[in-house]
Each structure stands twice: as structure tokens, then as C-alpha cells.
Image: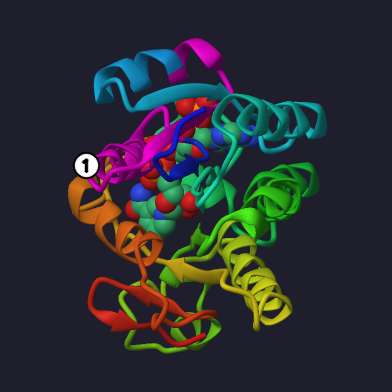
Amino acid sequence: MENKPAALVTGANKGIGLQIAKDLTTHGFTVLVGSRNFENGEIAAKSIGADAHAIQLDVTNQTSIAAAAERIRNEFGRLDVLVNNAAISHVPRPGAPFEEKMAAGRPSVVPIDEVRAVFETNVFGVMAVTQAMLPLLREAPAARIVNVSSEVGSLTMQTDKSNPYYGIQNGAYVPSKTALNAITVAFAKELEGTPIKVNMACPGYTATDLNDFHGTRTVEQGAHEPVRLALLDENGPTGTFSNEDGPLSW
Ligand code: NAP
């Protein structure tokens, strides 16, 4: 059993999640690198070092989630930080140009099954993983939950014509992040009065597979706000939505 605090990052085999996992090891955590493909998780964990351990975790699969929770309890004995980072922007469209993928997500044409798949990962997956990990998090002295959201989920920003992302027309990913914001608030309210803090971070437009590397920020920059929220002290807030520059509107 490890005595160091332990953190689980979902979807940590690549992108911003991998960077969050790396950064948390430098802050003294044993990090569980969640990956739906275990081998990819192992490669990622090896790239981080001895404090990182791959764990098979598909956030849409209840059996996988339950097995991960059991393994964390049996092998690590504690969980202090949960970063719900895994997400998809759309179903795979191999070889399709970025513009085509964006157009396919418009509310008028996006297949309902695709909307379901995106919500399954980005919303229901976060709820399912959080529910499964809460018994461990409640046992920790000061657990932190960080949900990686996006400013595109802000209804205020989506309806602000001066916002740079006003032009986005999307019926799956964007509303999934609005729903994620709502469930995060719900968890934060239920857990008020416990030491657990639940907050949301927007990493900013970051170059990753999620956007075919069109993002303008590095993963190092993208990981900054989620990691800050994972490390909040007892005076830190709960139920907030922010990026590196400060609070975001709902
Ligand atoms: P990414 O490079 O595509 O990484 C997404 C991660 O989620 C991958 O590890 C992926 O695993 C994993 N994942 C997808 N479905 C999963 C499932 N069912 N179970 C477990 N893992 C699953 O994207 P990213 O940009 O780093 O995204 C990280 C977070 O930042 C997401 O929540 C995203 O919405 C948010 N975000 C990103 C941006 C941006 O500009 N990049 C902006 C705002 C918010 P596989 O490798 O197996 O596919």
C-alpha cells in the first residue's frame, strides 16, 4: 500500500490528461493513468515514470469502472484526487477533414446516436466514474474532484455575439459540456459540508486529437487550470467554473 496521495485521471493516455497526470506526479501524487486501452495506458505511464500506473478504465463501461475502483482500493488503498478528463468531440470519422467533422456536428444533422455517444462519455461517464470513486474519495482527508469542461459549454458565452466561439454550431459536444457543468454543480452542492471540493476547469483551445491539433495552446498550458484545482487547499472554492484567467460565466 502506498502512503502518498493518489490521483486518478481519466483519459490520461494522451493529450491534456497525460499532461495532468505528469504534473500531478511532480506534485507528489501516485497517479493512476486511466486508459480505455490498457496498453496505451502502460506506454503513457512508462513515459511519466515510477509514480504513474496504468489502469484500464472505459468511462462508458460500468464493469470497467467498478473494476478500476476495486483495483484502486486493493492496490493503492486511497484516492485523493479524481480528474474527469476523458471526452470525445464526435464519433470517429477517420480521414474526414476537420471542416467536414465540424459540419457533421450541426444540431440539424448530427445523428442522434452520435449525440448519445458523446453524452455517454462526456456526461454519464463522468457521473458513473464519480459515483464509483466517491466511497474512496470520502475516506480521503481532503479529496478534490476536477471535471474538465470547456467554455463552449457556457450558455452565456454561446449566446454572446462578441465571443470568439459564437460561430460554433454543434448539437453534441457543446451541449454535453453544458450538461457536465450542471452535474458538476449538483455534485458540489451534495458534497457541501464535506472536505470534498468539486470544480470545473476549461483548459483553453489546446492542440490535441480532439480538434485534429487545430488548438492554439500547448498541453502544458491546457493542464495548468485542472492541476491548480486538483491542488486546492482547504480554503479553496467548490462548484466553480474557471480557466487560467479566472472565473467563467455559466
Ligand atoms: P484527446 O487528446 O482526444 O484525449 C481524450 C482522452 O479521452 C483520450 O485519452 C481518450 O482515449 C479518452 N477517452 C475517450 N473516450 C473514452 C472512454 N469512453 N473511456 C475512457 N477514456 C476515453 O483530447 P483532449 O483535448 O486532451 O481532451 C481532454 C479534455 O479537455 C476533454 O474533457 C475535453 O473536452 C477538454 N477540452 C479540450 C479542449 C481542447 O481544445 N483540446 C478545449 C476545452 C476542453 P483514447 O486515446 O482511447 O481515444
In the rendered image, residue 42, in percent from the top left (x then y), is placed at 42, 14
Q: Is residue 203 visible?
A: yes
Q: Nearer the viewer, residue 236 or 244?
A: 236
Q: Residues within 10 Å of mark 1 (few under 14, many from 20)?
A: few
Bounds of the magenta segment: 12-41
Q: Is residue 205 above or below residue 199?
A: above
The part of the image, by quadrant, that contains residue 73 is: top right
State the residue position of label 1: 26
Q: Looking at the picture, how far across and down is residue 160, in whole percent?
A: 42, 89
Give the residue displayed 55% in from the left and 17% down from the top: 37
At a point 24% along the width and 45% down the height, the residue shown is: 219
Answer with left or right where residue 173 lies relative to residue 110. Answer: left
Q: Quadrant of residue 233?
A: bottom left
34 magenta-colored: yes
Label 1 residue SS: helix
Task: Measuring from the top left, give residue 60's x and y in whole percent.
Answer: 73, 37
User: Of the residues shown, which amino acid type is indicated by label 1?
Assistant: Thr
In this picture, is 97 found above or below 166? above
Near-viewer residue (94 or 147) = 147
Name the residue at the top extreme.
39
- Taking the image as drawn, is residue 218 in sight? no
Image location of residue 39, percent across then percent down = 48, 10
Q: From what the image shows, is residue 232 above or below residue 237? A: above
